[in-house]
Amino acid sequence: MRPAMKARLVACGLAGAISIVGCSSSSGSPAPTATRAAARTATLTTALTSSATPIKGRYVAMGSSFAAGTGIGPDISDGCLRSAQNYPHLLASRLHLDLVDVTCGGATVLNLLNTPQGDHPAQIDALTADTRLVTITAGGNDLTYSLSTLICANSASAGQPCTNLPTPEATKTASATLRTNFTKLFAAIKAKAPRARILLVAYPRVFPNPPTTCPGNVISTADSVALADIGTTLQNTSRLAAADSHVTFIDAYTASAGHDVCAPDADRWVEGSNATGTPYHPDATGTAALSALIAKALPRPASQPATASQG
C-alpha cells in the first residue's frame, strides 16, 4: 500500500417526497383531517414557492472528507485535507455563490453540530443569519465506513484478513444514533440560518453491485459485501433523516451506480485501491459529477440554464 494511503486513514444522496391526502365529511364541513391537510398544503406551497427562488449569496459547505475532496489536489486548509477542487468549490463557481467551506476530513456529525475537531471549531459556527445555502455530506465516520474500508484495504494489500469490521449489530446501533444526531443538526442549522436551503448530499456508491474484488478493489469479496452493507445503511439512514426534517436529499448513491471502484477508469467517481489520490474516496470526475447533480436540484436564474448532470 502506498504511504499516502496509510497517511490518509480519514473517513469521511434527489429530494425526499411528501404526500398529502385530504378528506371531507359527508356534512360538507371540513373534517379535522381535511383541515390539517389543507394547512399542510398551504405550508408546502409556501415552501415550494420559496425554494423556487434562485440561490444567491452566502453558501456554507459542511461535511467530512467526501465533501472536502480529500486527495484531489493540495490541501488548502489547515490540516483538514480540503481541496480547492471539491464539490463545494465547483458548485460555488457554477452558481456564483459566496462560499465558506468548513468541510474537514474525519468529521462526524457531532463535529458539524457542537464538537470541535482538533483545533477546528464545530462547523456550524460558520453559519450566519444571511446564509442561503448549506450542503452536508457526513455520517460515514459515525459508522466507521471509510476508515474500515481503508483498514481492510491495508490488510488485503499485506495478504492478511480484515479483522476490524464493525458487527451488523454495532452498525445498527450507530445508525440509530446517526439519525438522531442528523435531526439535531438540521434543527440547529434552521435556528441559526432560518432562510437557508439545506441539502443533505449522500455518499456516492463505492463498491459495485454485487460487491466483488477487481483490479480497483483489493478487498476480498466477503469483506467488500460487509463494507457495502455499511454503505447501504448509511444511505438509508441519511435518506430517512432528511425526510424526518424535511431536508432536501441529493441521492448521489443511486446516481453513482456503475461509477464504483470496479468501473472503467474513465467512468469511476471514486478512487480504487490503486489510487493516486485517496483510495475509496471521490476522484475529480466524481466530484464534478456531484457538483452537477446538486446544481441540477437547485433553482437558478433564467440566464443560467441548468447543466445536465453527469451519469
Image (cartoon, rainbow, N blue to C red):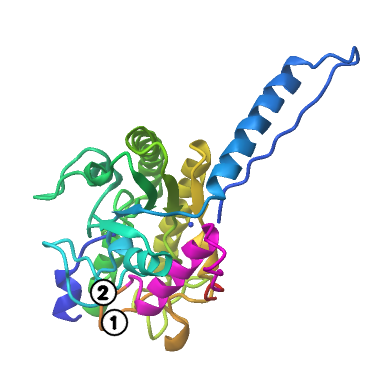
Check residue 223 for magenta coloring: no
Q: Which residues are magenta?
A: 280-307
Q: Residue at x 26, y 74 (%)?
A: 278
| Res. 135 visible in picture | yes
Check residue 290 for magenta coloring: yes
Taking 90 as reference, is 170 above or below it? above
Q: Nearer the viewer, residue 137 or 221?
A: 137
Q: Residue at x 38, y 72 (%)?
A: 287
| Whole-number angstrom distance, CA of label 2 to CA of label 1 | 6 Å
Q: Is residue 308 left or right of residue 168?
A: right
Inspect the image, locate mark 2, and give the three-letter code of the amino acid beneath it: Thr
What residue is shown with label 2? 278
Callout 1: helix, strand or loop?
A: loop
Q: Residue at x 29, y 68 (%)?
A: 69
Few, some or many residues within 10 Å of mark 2 (<14, 14–19, 20+): many
Q: Are marks 2 and 1 in contact (CB under 8 Å)?
A: yes
Q: Is residue 164 left or right of residue 56?
A: left
Residue 121 in picture, x, y percent from top left: 15, 45
Q: Is residue 68 left or right of residue 15?
A: left
Q: Is residue 229 left or right of residue 74?
A: right
Taking 284 as reference, is 170 above or below it? above
Callout 2: helix, strand or loop?
A: loop
What residue is shown with label 1? 275
